[in-house]
Amino acid sequence: MFLNEVLPPLVGKKFLLFLDSWKTQADLTKFRAAFPNQDSQLLIFPEGSTGYIQPQDLSLFRSRRYIHEKIEHYTQINRTEITITDRQYFINMHSVIHNQLSAPQCKDLIKSGFKQA
């Protein structure tokens, strides 16, 4: 769906697409079938390298994961009664994480990920 419907209107005749090595995404035959007449290239990140070379895994997502783990540890240590399957739990969790990552100190977080990669 992504290769056939979402990506084509967004790219020109010539483009470079970076993909993770996840088997369902990194299928060169699907890529060539979707873009048969274009001067395009597909770059697949080696397996296990995602956390080291993808910009947002180096900054934004790593910080998000860190905050999420801290909240989880807090709820476990203080034996806070929560229902993990409750929809409101996830809404509250992501709301707190968004609030923390929206702080002025985190303003350049996304930029720093691209510099590190």
Image (tube, rainbow, N blue to C red):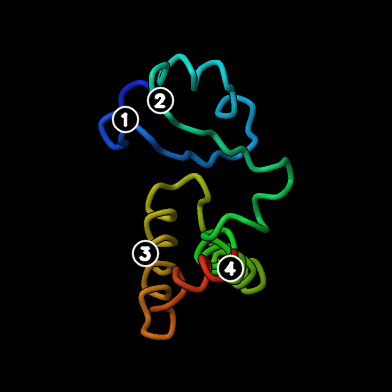
Crowd around label 2: few <14 · some 14–19 · many ≥20 (10 Å): some
Image-quadrant location for residue 9: top left
Q: Nearer the viewer, mark 3 or mark 2?
A: 2
The disc placed on residue 54 is none
Question: Residue at horizontal 59%, vertical 28%?
Answer: 26
The disc placed on residue 3 is 2
The disc placed on residue 6 is 1
State how far apart marks 3 and 2 are (Cα): 31 Å
Crowd around label 1: few <14 · some 14–19 · many ≥20 (10 Å): few
The disc placed on residue 75 is 4
Crowd around label 3: few <14 · some 14–19 · many ≥20 (10 Å): few
Quadrant placement of the C terminus:
bottom right
- Mark 2–mark 1 CB contact (< 8 Å): yes
Give the mark nearest the N terminus, 3 or 1: 1
State how far apart marks 2 and 1 are (Cα): 6 Å
Q: Position of residue 110 (x, y in %)?
A: 45, 68
State how far apart marks 1 and 4 are (Cα): 40 Å
Q: Amino acid at mark 2?
A: Leu
Q: Amino acid at mark 1?
A: Val
Q: Is residue 112 above or below residue 29?
A: below
Which of 20 and 78 lies nearest the eye of the viewer? 20
Secondary element at tag 4: helix
Give the mark nearest the N terminus, 4 or 2: 2
Q: Which residue is mark 3?
A: 95
